[in-house]
Amino acid sequence: MGIAERAWIVLGTAFRCLGVPPAAALELDALLQGFPRAGAAAGTPEIPEIPEIVDLRVEGSGTPEAPFAIVVAGPEGGRWQVPPGAPLSSHLEYRVVDGAIQRTRSHWVLHAGAVVAGDGTCLVIGESGAGKTSLALWLSAAGLPLVSDDLCPIPRGSRRPEVFPRALHMDAQYSPRLLARIPPRPAGYPADYYPFPGAAGAAASPPPPISRLLVLERGSSPQGEVEVEELLQAQAVHHLLAALIKGPAFHYATALETLLPIGAACRAYRLRSSTPEGAGERALAILAS
Amino acid sequence: MNPPPQPRPRPESTFSLRPGVRLEPLGDGSAVLFANDLDQSLSLNHTAALLCSYADGQHTLAMVVQEMGQIFPGSAIDEEALAACLLDLQARNFLQWG
Protein backbone atom coordinates (compact mmCIF):
# COMPACT_ATOMS: atom_id res chain seq x y z
CA MET A 1 0.00 0.00 0.00
CA GLY A 2 1.47 3.32 -1.02
CA ILE A 3 1.31 6.51 0.97
CA ALA A 4 -1.19 7.96 -1.47
CA GLU A 5 -3.65 5.22 -0.65
CA ARG A 6 -4.24 5.60 3.07
CA ALA A 7 -2.39 8.47 4.68
CA TRP A 8 -3.68 11.73 6.05
CA ILE A 9 -2.02 14.92 7.20
CA VAL A 10 -3.23 16.15 10.55
CA LEU A 11 -1.60 19.17 12.22
CA GLY A 12 1.43 18.84 10.00
CA THR A 13 2.12 15.16 10.57
CA ALA A 14 1.33 12.47 8.02
CA PHE A 15 -0.23 9.32 9.43
CA ARG A 16 -0.07 6.18 7.32
CA CYS A 17 -2.41 3.37 8.29
CA LEU A 18 -1.17 -0.05 7.27
CA GLY A 19 -2.80 -3.44 7.36
CA VAL A 20 -6.32 -2.06 7.73
CA PRO A 21 -8.99 -4.61 6.76
CA PRO A 22 -11.17 -3.43 3.83
CA ALA A 23 -14.36 -2.81 5.82
CA ALA A 24 -12.56 -0.74 8.46
CA ALA A 25 -10.63 1.05 5.72
CA LEU A 26 -13.84 2.32 4.15
CA GLU A 27 -15.04 3.63 7.51
CA LEU A 28 -11.67 5.21 8.21
CA ASP A 29 -11.80 6.97 4.85
CA ALA A 30 -15.18 8.38 5.83
CA LEU A 31 -14.09 9.49 9.30
CA LEU A 32 -10.97 11.27 8.06
CA GLN A 33 -12.33 12.52 4.75
CA GLY A 34 -11.99 16.17 5.76
CA PHE A 35 -8.23 16.00 6.21
CA PRO A 36 -5.81 16.32 3.29
CA ARG A 37 -4.39 13.12 1.92
CA ALA A 38 -0.67 12.72 1.80
CA GLY A 39 0.79 12.13 -1.62
CA ALA A 40 -0.90 12.31 -4.96
CA ALA A 41 -4.34 10.91 -4.33
CA ALA A 42 -6.60 10.88 -7.33
CA GLY A 43 -7.84 14.36 -8.16
CA THR A 44 -6.05 16.13 -5.34
CA PRO A 45 -2.85 18.12 -5.57
CA GLU A 46 0.18 16.53 -4.06
CA ILE A 47 1.40 18.05 -0.83
CA PRO A 48 5.14 18.23 -1.39
CA GLU A 49 6.56 18.59 2.10
CA ILE A 50 5.63 16.36 4.97
CA PRO A 51 7.96 16.83 7.92
CA GLU A 52 7.16 13.53 9.58
CA ILE A 53 5.41 10.30 8.62
CA VAL A 54 4.06 8.12 11.38
CA ASP A 55 3.02 4.57 10.66
CA LEU A 56 0.06 2.94 12.37
CA ARG A 57 -0.02 -0.79 11.78
CA VAL A 58 -2.97 -3.00 12.53
CA GLU A 59 -2.17 -6.39 14.01
CA GLY A 60 -4.51 -9.28 14.71
CA SER A 61 -7.60 -10.47 12.90
CA GLY A 62 -10.34 -9.14 15.13
CA THR A 63 -11.25 -12.54 16.51
CA PRO A 64 -11.53 -13.23 20.24
CA GLU A 65 -8.33 -15.24 19.96
CA ALA A 66 -6.48 -12.53 18.02
CA PRO A 67 -8.13 -9.16 18.71
CA PHE A 68 -7.03 -6.14 16.77
CA ALA A 69 -4.18 -4.04 18.10
CA ILE A 70 -2.85 -0.75 16.78
CA VAL A 71 0.90 -0.34 16.83
CA VAL A 72 2.19 3.20 16.40
CA ALA A 73 5.82 3.59 15.46
CA GLY A 74 8.25 6.07 16.89
CA PRO A 75 9.28 7.39 20.29
CA GLU A 76 5.80 8.67 21.09
CA GLY A 77 4.19 5.49 19.84
CA GLY A 78 2.93 2.41 21.57
CA ARG A 79 0.64 -0.57 21.21
CA TRP A 80 -3.07 -0.30 21.92
CA GLN A 81 -5.44 -3.23 22.10
CA VAL A 82 -8.86 -2.78 20.50
CA PRO A 83 -11.52 -4.36 22.70
CA PRO A 84 -13.26 -7.29 20.98
CA GLY A 85 -16.29 -6.06 19.08
CA ALA A 86 -15.25 -2.40 19.19
CA PRO A 87 -15.03 -0.64 15.82
CA LEU A 88 -11.45 -0.65 14.58
CA SER A 89 -12.01 2.44 12.44
CA SER A 90 -12.91 4.72 15.35
CA HIS A 91 -9.91 3.48 17.35
CA LEU A 92 -7.64 4.18 14.39
CA GLU A 93 -9.16 7.62 13.91
CA TYR A 94 -8.63 8.40 17.59
CA ARG A 95 -4.98 7.27 17.41
CA VAL A 96 -4.38 9.48 14.39
CA VAL A 97 -5.92 12.56 16.00
CA ASP A 98 -4.34 11.96 19.38
CA GLY A 99 -0.98 11.30 17.76
CA ALA A 100 -1.24 14.57 15.86
CA ILE A 101 -2.01 16.51 19.04
CA GLN A 102 0.84 14.87 20.94
CA ARG A 103 3.32 15.64 18.18
CA THR A 104 2.42 19.15 17.18
CA ARG A 105 4.80 21.90 18.20
CA SER A 106 3.19 24.53 16.01
CA HIS A 107 -0.32 24.61 17.45
CA TRP A 108 -2.18 24.72 20.71
CA VAL A 109 -5.25 22.53 20.68
CA LEU A 110 -8.31 23.37 22.74
CA HIS A 111 -11.22 21.17 23.70
CA ALA A 112 -13.64 23.48 21.97
CA GLY A 113 -16.21 23.73 19.29
CA ALA A 114 -16.06 26.78 17.07
CA VAL A 115 -18.18 28.55 14.48
CA VAL A 116 -17.74 31.71 12.45
CA ALA A 117 -20.12 34.44 13.59
CA GLY A 118 -19.95 37.69 11.68
CA ASP A 119 -16.38 38.83 11.33
CA GLY A 120 -15.08 36.71 14.20
CA THR A 121 -14.86 33.16 15.41
CA CYS A 122 -16.79 32.03 18.46
CA LEU A 123 -15.33 29.29 20.64
CA VAL A 124 -17.61 26.98 22.60
CA ILE A 125 -15.99 25.32 25.58
CA GLY A 126 -17.34 23.33 28.47
CA GLU A 127 -16.95 20.16 30.43
CA SER A 128 -17.54 16.83 28.72
CA GLY A 129 -21.30 16.36 28.42
CA ALA A 130 -22.08 20.07 28.68
CA GLY A 131 -23.46 20.05 25.15
CA LYS A 132 -20.64 21.44 23.00
CA THR A 133 -21.46 19.22 20.04
CA SER A 134 -25.18 19.99 20.30
CA LEU A 135 -24.53 23.71 20.41
CA ALA A 136 -22.01 23.61 17.58
CA LEU A 137 -24.51 21.70 15.45
CA TRP A 138 -27.33 24.04 16.41
CA LEU A 139 -25.29 27.06 15.38
CA SER A 140 -24.13 25.30 12.23
CA ALA A 141 -27.74 24.45 11.35
CA ALA A 142 -28.55 28.14 11.77
CA GLY A 143 -26.07 28.92 9.02
CA LEU A 144 -22.90 29.69 10.98
CA PRO A 145 -19.93 28.01 9.27
CA LEU A 146 -18.41 25.27 11.42
CA VAL A 147 -14.73 25.51 12.36
CA SER A 148 -14.52 22.55 14.71
CA ASP A 149 -16.68 20.31 16.80
CA ASP A 150 -14.61 19.32 19.82
CA LEU A 151 -10.97 20.05 19.01
CA CYS A 152 -9.87 23.47 17.88
CA PRO A 153 -6.24 24.03 16.86
CA ILE A 154 -4.78 27.50 17.10
CA PRO A 155 -1.37 28.23 15.59
CA ARG A 156 0.94 29.53 18.30
CA GLY A 157 0.96 33.27 18.50
CA SER A 158 -2.19 33.60 16.41
CA ARG A 159 -5.78 34.55 17.20
CA ARG A 160 -7.08 32.71 14.17
CA PRO A 161 -8.02 29.07 14.72
CA GLU A 162 -7.78 26.45 12.02
CA VAL A 163 -10.61 24.42 10.60
CA PHE A 164 -10.39 20.94 12.09
CA PRO A 165 -12.61 18.74 9.94
CA ARG A 166 -12.83 15.78 12.26
CA ALA A 167 -16.01 13.71 12.01
CA LEU A 168 -18.43 14.63 14.78
CA HIS A 169 -18.76 12.04 17.52
CA MET A 170 -22.46 11.67 18.27
CA ASP A 171 -22.85 8.76 20.63
CA ALA A 172 -25.41 10.29 23.00
CA GLN A 173 -29.12 11.05 22.86
CA TYR A 174 -29.66 14.22 20.91
CA SER A 175 -32.65 16.51 20.90
CA PRO A 176 -35.20 15.64 18.20
CA ARG A 177 -35.45 19.36 17.43
CA LEU A 178 -31.70 19.42 16.79
CA LEU A 179 -31.74 16.27 14.66
CA ALA A 180 -34.60 17.70 12.61
CA ARG A 181 -32.44 20.71 11.72
CA ILE A 182 -29.45 18.86 10.33
CA PRO A 183 -29.19 16.66 7.24
CA PRO A 184 -29.57 12.95 7.93
CA ARG A 185 -26.47 10.89 8.47
CA PRO A 186 -25.35 9.54 5.08
CA ALA A 187 -26.19 5.92 4.43
CA GLY A 188 -23.39 3.63 5.48
CA TYR A 189 -21.63 6.28 7.55
CA PRO A 190 -19.99 4.83 10.69
CA ALA A 191 -22.37 4.56 13.62
CA ASP A 192 -22.01 7.19 16.36
CA TYR A 193 -20.40 9.64 13.93
CA TYR A 194 -21.65 12.45 11.75
CA PRO A 195 -19.68 13.90 8.85
CA PHE A 196 -18.01 17.26 9.19
CA PRO A 197 -19.90 19.54 6.82
CA GLY A 198 -18.62 19.98 3.32
CA ALA A 199 -17.65 23.26 1.75
CA ALA A 200 -21.17 24.67 2.08
CA GLY A 201 -21.24 24.34 5.86
CA ALA A 202 -17.61 24.61 6.84
CA ALA A 203 -15.71 27.80 7.52
CA ALA A 204 -13.39 29.13 4.87
CA SER A 205 -9.76 28.73 5.75
CA PRO A 206 -8.39 30.45 7.73
CA PRO A 207 -11.35 31.46 9.89
CA PRO A 208 -11.42 35.00 11.30
CA PRO A 209 -9.81 35.84 14.68
CA ILE A 210 -11.51 34.60 17.82
CA SER A 211 -13.82 37.31 19.12
CA ARG A 212 -16.33 35.46 21.30
CA LEU A 213 -16.15 32.74 23.90
CA LEU A 214 -19.11 30.78 25.22
CA VAL A 215 -18.51 28.73 28.35
CA LEU A 216 -21.26 26.17 28.34
CA GLU A 217 -22.62 24.62 31.52
CA ARG A 218 -25.46 22.18 31.94
CA GLY A 219 -28.24 23.81 33.90
CA SER A 220 -30.86 22.13 36.04
CA SER A 221 -33.87 24.36 35.51
CA PRO A 222 -36.85 22.15 34.60
CA GLN A 223 -38.42 25.12 32.82
CA GLY A 224 -35.42 25.34 30.54
CA GLU A 225 -34.43 28.79 31.72
CA VAL A 226 -31.10 29.97 30.40
CA GLU A 227 -28.69 31.89 32.60
CA VAL A 228 -26.15 34.16 30.98
CA GLU A 229 -23.27 35.90 32.70
CA GLU A 230 -20.65 38.03 31.01
CA LEU A 231 -17.16 37.07 32.14
CA LEU A 232 -14.08 39.10 32.89
CA GLN A 233 -11.25 38.81 30.41
CA ALA A 234 -9.17 37.12 33.09
CA GLN A 235 -11.90 34.52 33.51
CA ALA A 236 -11.90 34.02 29.75
CA VAL A 237 -8.17 33.34 29.84
CA HIS A 238 -8.66 30.98 32.75
CA HIS A 239 -11.28 28.99 30.81
CA LEU A 240 -9.10 28.94 27.71
CA LEU A 241 -6.23 27.56 29.77
CA ALA A 242 -8.48 24.91 31.28
CA ALA A 243 -9.64 23.87 27.80
CA LEU A 244 -6.10 23.58 26.47
CA ILE A 245 -4.87 20.05 25.89
CA LYS A 246 -1.64 19.92 27.83
CA GLY A 247 0.51 17.61 25.74
CA PRO A 248 4.28 17.12 25.90
CA ALA A 249 4.90 20.56 24.36
CA PHE A 250 2.81 22.41 26.94
CA HIS A 251 4.57 25.27 28.65
CA TYR A 252 2.58 27.66 30.76
CA ALA A 253 4.25 30.92 29.84
CA THR A 254 4.36 30.05 26.14
CA ALA A 255 0.71 29.04 26.09
CA LEU A 256 -0.24 32.30 27.74
CA GLU A 257 1.53 34.23 25.00
CA THR A 258 -1.17 32.93 22.68
CA LEU A 259 -4.12 32.81 25.06
CA LEU A 260 -3.76 36.21 26.76
CA PRO A 261 -4.30 38.18 23.54
CA ILE A 262 -7.27 35.98 22.71
CA GLY A 263 -8.84 36.52 26.13
CA ALA A 264 -8.15 40.23 25.90
CA ALA A 265 -9.82 40.52 22.51
CA CYS A 266 -12.96 38.51 23.01
CA ARG A 267 -16.22 38.94 24.86
CA ALA A 268 -16.88 35.90 26.99
CA TYR A 269 -20.12 34.58 28.45
CA ARG A 270 -21.06 31.75 30.75
CA LEU A 271 -24.16 30.07 29.36
CA ARG A 272 -26.07 27.71 31.62
CA SER A 273 -28.95 25.84 30.04
CA SER A 274 -30.78 22.61 30.68
CA THR A 275 -31.81 22.18 27.06
CA PRO A 276 -29.89 22.35 23.79
CA GLU A 277 -32.68 24.44 22.31
CA GLY A 278 -32.30 27.01 25.07
CA ALA A 279 -28.54 27.12 24.71
CA GLY A 280 -28.79 27.35 20.94
CA GLU A 281 -31.33 30.14 20.82
CA ARG A 282 -29.57 32.21 23.47
CA ALA A 283 -26.19 31.68 21.84
CA LEU A 284 -27.59 32.92 18.53
CA ALA A 285 -28.93 36.01 20.28
CA ILE A 286 -25.55 36.70 21.89
CA LEU A 287 -23.73 36.27 18.61
CA ALA A 288 -26.14 38.57 16.82
CA SER A 289 -25.67 41.35 19.38
CA MET B 1 -7.29 18.92 57.03
CA ASN B 2 -7.29 22.69 56.67
CA PRO B 3 -3.97 24.51 56.96
CA PRO B 4 -3.48 26.50 60.16
CA PRO B 5 -4.75 30.06 59.93
CA GLN B 6 -2.15 32.56 58.87
CA PRO B 7 -1.34 35.45 61.18
CA ARG B 8 -2.65 38.76 59.97
CA PRO B 9 0.16 40.77 58.34
CA ARG B 10 1.38 43.82 60.20
CA PRO B 11 0.43 47.12 58.50
CA GLU B 12 4.11 47.98 58.03
CA SER B 13 4.88 44.70 56.24
CA THR B 14 5.73 44.94 52.58
CA PHE B 15 4.71 42.24 50.14
CA SER B 16 5.72 41.09 46.69
CA LEU B 17 4.93 38.45 44.14
CA ARG B 18 7.01 35.35 44.66
CA PRO B 19 9.87 35.01 42.14
CA GLY B 20 8.57 33.30 39.02
CA VAL B 21 5.07 34.69 39.44
CA ARG B 22 3.83 37.06 36.74
CA LEU B 23 0.94 39.46 36.76
CA GLU B 24 -0.69 39.96 33.36
CA PRO B 25 -3.13 42.90 33.41
CA LEU B 26 -5.97 42.84 30.89
CA GLY B 27 -7.84 45.66 29.25
CA ASP B 28 -10.99 45.40 31.35
CA GLY B 29 -9.08 45.80 34.62
CA SER B 30 -8.98 42.12 35.48
CA ALA B 31 -5.69 40.22 35.44
CA VAL B 32 -4.17 36.79 35.27
CA LEU B 33 -1.62 35.78 37.85
CA PHE B 34 0.43 32.75 36.98
CA ALA B 35 3.29 30.78 38.43
CA ASN B 36 5.25 28.90 35.84
CA ASP B 37 6.81 26.50 38.33
CA LEU B 38 3.44 25.63 39.84
CA ASP B 39 1.64 25.27 36.50
CA GLN B 40 -1.15 27.28 38.05
CA SER B 41 -2.93 30.49 37.28
CA LEU B 42 -5.51 32.65 38.98
CA SER B 43 -7.99 35.00 37.41
CA LEU B 44 -8.21 38.21 39.40
CA ASN B 45 -11.11 40.63 39.50
CA HIS B 46 -10.50 44.35 39.31
CA THR B 47 -9.83 44.84 43.01
CA ALA B 48 -7.50 41.87 43.34
CA ALA B 49 -5.70 42.90 40.16
CA LEU B 50 -5.18 46.41 41.51
CA LEU B 51 -4.01 45.01 44.83
CA CYS B 52 -1.46 42.77 43.11
CA SER B 53 -0.15 45.72 41.12
CA TYR B 54 1.19 47.01 44.45
CA ALA B 55 3.04 43.76 45.18
CA ASP B 56 6.45 45.25 44.49
CA GLY B 57 8.22 44.80 47.80
CA GLN B 58 7.92 48.54 48.45
CA HIS B 59 4.29 48.97 49.39
CA THR B 60 2.87 48.06 52.76
CA LEU B 61 -0.75 47.21 53.33
CA ALA B 62 -1.23 50.58 55.03
CA MET B 63 0.18 52.39 51.98
CA VAL B 64 -2.11 50.40 49.68
CA VAL B 65 -5.15 51.35 51.74
CA GLN B 66 -4.12 54.99 51.53
CA GLU B 67 -3.47 54.91 47.77
CA MET B 68 -6.68 53.05 47.03
CA GLY B 69 -8.51 55.64 49.06
CA GLN B 70 -7.13 58.29 46.72
CA ILE B 71 -8.15 56.29 43.65
CA PHE B 72 -11.66 55.69 44.97
CA PRO B 73 -12.44 58.83 46.98
CA GLY B 74 -15.54 58.49 49.05
CA SER B 75 -15.38 54.70 49.12
CA ALA B 76 -14.53 52.83 52.28
CA ILE B 77 -11.47 50.66 51.66
CA ASP B 78 -11.91 47.34 53.44
CA GLU B 79 -8.45 46.70 54.88
CA GLU B 80 -9.53 43.38 56.33
CA ALA B 81 -10.67 42.14 52.93
CA LEU B 82 -7.41 43.26 51.30
CA ALA B 83 -5.40 41.50 54.01
CA ALA B 84 -7.46 38.34 53.54
CA CYS B 85 -6.83 38.44 49.79
CA LEU B 86 -3.07 38.80 50.32
CA LEU B 87 -3.04 35.95 52.83
CA ASP B 88 -4.93 33.78 50.38
CA LEU B 89 -2.38 34.54 47.67
CA GLN B 90 0.40 33.74 50.12
CA ALA B 91 -1.25 30.42 51.01
CA ARG B 92 -1.43 29.59 47.30
CA ASN B 93 2.28 30.35 47.02
CA PHE B 94 1.87 33.33 44.72
CA LEU B 95 2.93 36.02 47.19
CA GLN B 96 5.48 36.59 49.92
CA TRP B 97 5.89 39.06 52.76
CA GLY B 98 8.90 41.22 53.43
Image (tube, coloured by chain):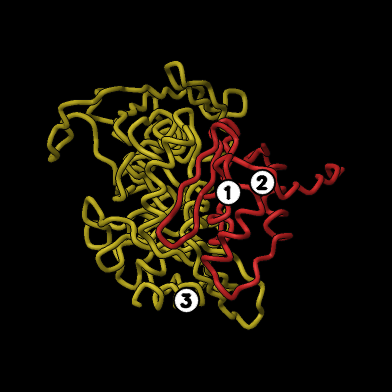
**Three-letter amino acid code of the residue under disc 2:** Leu
Colour of chain A, in one word, is yellow
Q: State if disc 1 and disc 3 touch (CB < 8 Å).
A: no
Quadrant hosting residue A31 = top left
Q: Residue at x 46, y 38 (%)?
A: A94
* Residue with the mark numbered 3: A177
Q: Are marks 2 and 3 on the same chain?
A: no
SS type, badge 3: helix
Q: Position of residue A200 (x, y in %)?
A: 22, 62
Q: Nearer the viewer, residue A249 or B55?
A: B55
Q: Are marks 1 and 2 on the same chain?
A: yes
**Three-letter amino acid code of the residue under disc 3:** Arg
Check the picture and name the quadrant holding the C terminus of chain A: bottom left
* Residue with the mark numbered 2: B89
SS type, badge 1: strand
**Residue A150 visible in rendering:** yes
Q: Which chain does the numbered disc 3 sit on?
A: A
- Alpha-carbon span between mark 2 and mark 3: 47 Å
Colour of chain B, in one word, is red
SS type, badge 2: helix
Q: Position of residue A266 (x, y in %)?
A: 38, 61
Instruction: Count neighbours of disc 1 (C-alpha within 10 A) and say few if under 14, some if 14 to 19, many if 20 or more.
Output: some
Q: Position of residue A283 (x, y in %)?
A: 43, 72
* Residue with the mark numbered 1: B42
